[in-house]
Image: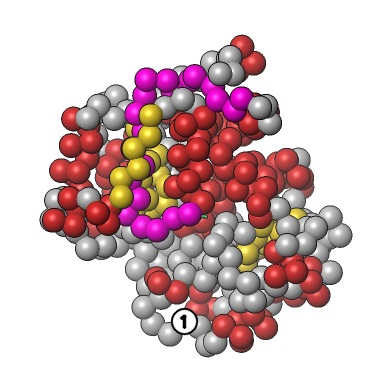
């Protein structure tokens, strides 16, 4: 991040939430404020910043509404007018393929106007602060900011500073949270497996740096999955994960026995500031999701990955492309899930979307 950011780390004075210390704890400011800020007084979604602080009924409502939008997407005319007249600004301070484009598609399918702010060629490169960028977008009468940022807590910080009519959606902040990814993962799991409470879910890889894993674990806990196992090398699997009710293992073969859902994670080498890995070959030998290893899981187990995938490192190509993989289904569902979250945050969802005309 090469711009002056009046971001959460300077605000909290607590240091970064996700430095390379193995800490999984959130900054104190998030622990104390996020529960209030995400929801209106009546418990409806206003911002979508983290899974923590949301209720089971919040999550189920998102999944149910996304299901309706998924039905709309199957129709020839894919648009609904729920956000007509609204302007959504995509503010991505970090690279993204899936998240940015599916947010753009989701906003367009809700009939919103979409601004994609290219941070690398914006006034940010001339020294403008994050808050000044936001103030200018507010002056252009934006209604929603979708934010990806390298600093943990950035989305909360922005939500604390925007005008009251604006909703903020977290598209990934540092090592803290990627809540829309977790919700699209829950959507894919529910569609394939139904009842969350009966599942054995194995999450394998770089748990230490993964905002995705953190959000998935919170969502699975809220939705009632009692059997979650995190697997990875000791250097990438902090002991504090146990505090989230997760089993820890360092042998993938043992962890996979009778698994229903196997989730691979990307090795986040850009976040590794010290030698946490031996070699990629060695990693693949110990923690790669392979055809041989998938024989240990249930025959109907599904394989997931948030992407981008590193074939031959995190996952064997034949598994990524194989019959148990739902990786691309995750991406497709991400549009419907993001449509649901955006419309709920803007307060524009009729409970019965069946009456909403397709345009
Ligand atoms: N899963 C995910 O966040 O991918 P992108 O970085 O491509 O958005």
Q: Which residues are magenta?
A: 77-97
Q: Is residue 322 left or right of residue 53?
A: right
In this view of the protein, which residue sits in the foreground, 43 or 280? 280
Q: How is the image coloured?
A: secondary structure
Q: Quadrant of the C terminus?
A: top right
Task: Report the front residue among 90 and 57.
Answer: 90
In this picture, is 117 found above or below 10? above
Q: Residue sitting at 74 percent across and 51 percent down? A: 199
Residue situated furthest top in the rendering: 355
Residue at image x 53%, y 48%?
181
Query: On the image, which quarter does residue 285 sit in?
Result: bottom right
Q: Where is mark 1, residue-wise? A: 276
Q: Is residue 229 left or right of residue 257?
A: left
Q: Is 260 drawn above or below residue 131 in the view shown?
A: below
Does the magenta portion include 96?
A: yes
Determine whether the residue tagged by mark 1 lies in a helix, strand or loop.
loop
Q: What x and y, as percent, mark residue 326?
A: 71, 53
Q: Position of residue 270 (x, y in %)?
A: 40, 72
Main SS type for the magenta part?
loop
**Label 1 crowd (10 A; few <14 / some 14-19 / many >=20):** some
């Amino acid at each position: 991040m090469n711009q002056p950011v009046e971001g959460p780390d300077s605000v909290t004075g607590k240091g970064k939430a996700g430095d390379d210390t193995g800490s999984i704890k959130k900054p104190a400011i998030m622990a104390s404020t996020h529960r209030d800020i995400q929801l209106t007084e009546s418990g409806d979604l206003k911002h979508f910043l983290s899974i923590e602080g949301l209720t089971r009924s919040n999550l189920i409502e998102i999944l149910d509404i996304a299901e309706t939008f998924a039905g709309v997407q199957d129709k020839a005319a894919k648009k609904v007018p729920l956000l007509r007249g609204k302007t959504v600004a995509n503010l991505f301070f970090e690279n993204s393929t899936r998240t940015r484009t599916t947010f753009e598609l989701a906003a367009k399918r809700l009939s919103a106007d979409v601004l994609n702010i290219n941070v690398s060629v914006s006034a940010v490169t001339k020294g403008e602060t994050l808050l000044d960028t936001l103030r200018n977008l507010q002056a252009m009468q934006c209604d929603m900011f979708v934010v990806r940022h390298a600093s943990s807590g950035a989305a909360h910080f922005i939500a604390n500073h925007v005008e009251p009519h604006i909703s903020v959606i977290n598209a990934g902040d540092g090592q803290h949270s990627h809540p829309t990814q977790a919700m699209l993962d829950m959507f894919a799991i529910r569609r394939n497996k139904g009842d969350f409470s009966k599942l054995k879910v194995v999450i394998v890889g770089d748990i230490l740096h993964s905002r995705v894993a953190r959000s998935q674990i919170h969502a699975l806990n809220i939705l009632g999955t009692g059997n979650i196992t995190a697997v990875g090398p000791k250097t990438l699997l902090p002991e504090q994960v146990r505090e989230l009710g997760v089993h820890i293992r360092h042998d993938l073969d043992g962890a996979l026995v009778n698994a229903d859902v196997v989730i691979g994670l990307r090795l986040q080498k850009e976040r590794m500031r010290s030698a946490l890995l031996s070699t990629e070959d060695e990693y693949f030998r110990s923690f790669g999701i392979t055809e041989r290893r998938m024989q240990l899981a249930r025959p109907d187990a599904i394989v997931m990955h948030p992407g981008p995938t590193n074939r031959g490192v995190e996952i064997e190509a034949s598994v990524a492309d194989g019959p148990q993989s739902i990786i691309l289904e995750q991406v497709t569902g991400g549009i419907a899930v993001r449509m649901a979250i955006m419309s709920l945050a803007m307060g524009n969802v009729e409970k019965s979307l069946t009456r909403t005309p397709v345009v």
